[in-house]
Image (cartoon, rainbow, N blue to C red):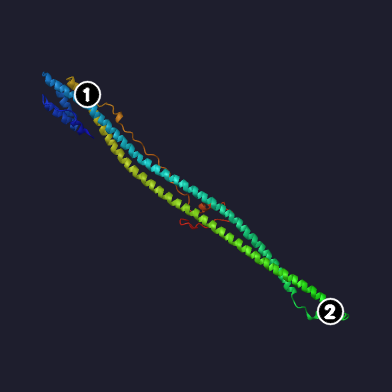
Amino acid sequence: MRWLAWVGLAWAKPEMAGPELLTDLDAGLASRNLSKIQAVLMSIANSNSSNSSDDGTVENMLSDVDDIVNNTLQPSVKSDFHVAQSELSGFYELFLRCEEEQLSNFKDSVTVQRAVAAGAEEHNACRRQQVISLDEKLSCETLLNASVTAKEAKCQLFHSTARVPDISVCNAAMDEDVEAFHERKIKEFRHGLDLLLERQKGCQEANLQVKDQQGACALTGEHFADQKAACDRKQLEVDTAVCRLQRRMGTNCAAYNACRAQAMVSFSEANESAKMTEAELQTTWKMLEQVRCMIDGAKQRDPHRVALCSDKTHFSVAHLTLNYTGTPPMAPCQALSESPGGAEYMQELYGHLPEQAPAAPCQAACCLKI
């Protein structure tokens, strides 16, 4: 408050009649002693000076005091009120800064969640491709099994044919001519040799088919393993991103709560200080209104009116009532419903994957191990 400064601006004290009244009035204003001010003005109101020069000096002094009250002291009270209201509003803005920071963090969180959703969709697409790779691998293994079965049958037939015949087959029948026997056996041996070579070729070709199929299956197996590993890496990226999001949510929530708590402390202190300032300003305003009333009575040399002014308290101070704004509601803190790796998390994020390509166990740092 600038009350003491106001008094120094009031007037230059004349060296004419009644300097002690001016001194007392000055002291009363400086100390806000309404009784002393009333006594001075009552003295003036009771005076019946015949000295026109002294009377003119007193009138000028009263006019100067009235002018100071109207044009300096009361405007200063209003100015102090606006400063107090501005400071109070400034403390309310502490909450707004907390909310703005929380909103910024929320927007960042939404951006990260969208990135996680995009990563999850890429992972899903990868698992669907993994199913295709698995089908190719299983189809190849089915063909390989069929090739092995065919090879075993053909080679078994070849090996069963490639045997030295029993010596008894080299003896002619009792009634068979030797030449006819030789001719018959040559035909049989040639036919047997052709059949043996044909079956040998079939066995060799079957072996080649098995080797070719084994090579193809090795490639499809490698492709499937690579595809599954790629999908596992994508899943790890998704789970790791969710872990980072979880940590960020926790950090942001703690920072927001701390910001709100500090703002509440400052806001409460500011409100208490503002209430005292408000009461002081309103009291000062009423006193100045009483002084103005007393000055009017003193000018009219009406001691009764001066006395009544000290009892008047109905002066309006509505324009000096501060606007105490409430605190804005707290924004909800974001948090994951369940940590990565939990049953609900795995079901929510990976429960719709194909049965042939389920999600791998969660391997990110924050994952719950179940």
Percent of width and height locating residue 356: 59, 56
Is 124 positioned to the left or the right of 304 in the image?
Answer: right
Image side of residue 126 versus residue 314, left or right: right
Helix, strand or loop at label 1? It is: helix
Who's the residue at 35% across and 39% down the image? 92
**Distance from the alpha carbon under mark 1 to that under mark 2:** 161 Å
Query: Looking at the image, do the residues carrying marks 1 and 2 touch, with CB atoms under 8 Å apart?
Result: no
Asked whether residue 277 appears in the rendered view, the answer is yes
> Residue 184 in the image: x percent, y percent?
84, 76
Which of discs 1 and 2 lies nearer the camera? The answer is 2
- Residue marked by disc 1: 293
On residue 246, the disc is none
The image quadrant where one finds the N terminus is top left
8 or 215: nearer the viewer:
215
- Res 182 label: 2
The image quadrant of residue 142 is bottom right
Q: Is residue 343 left or right of residue 16?
A: right
- Residue type at mark 1: give it: Cys
Residue at 35 percent of width and 41 percent of height? 94
- Relative horizontal placement of residue 31, taking residue 346 as reference (left or right): left
Image spot of residue 52 (x, y percent)? 12, 18
Q: Residues within 10 Å of mark 1 (few under 14, many from 20)?
A: some
Give the image quarter of residue 132. Answer: bottom right
Q: Position of residue 43 (x, y in %)?
A: 14, 24
Label 2 Cα neighbours within 10 Å, binned few <14 / some 14-19 / many ≥20: some
Three-letter code, disc 2 = His
User: Which residue is at 31% across, 34% downward?
Assistant: 85
Nearest to N terminus: mark 1 or mark 2: 2
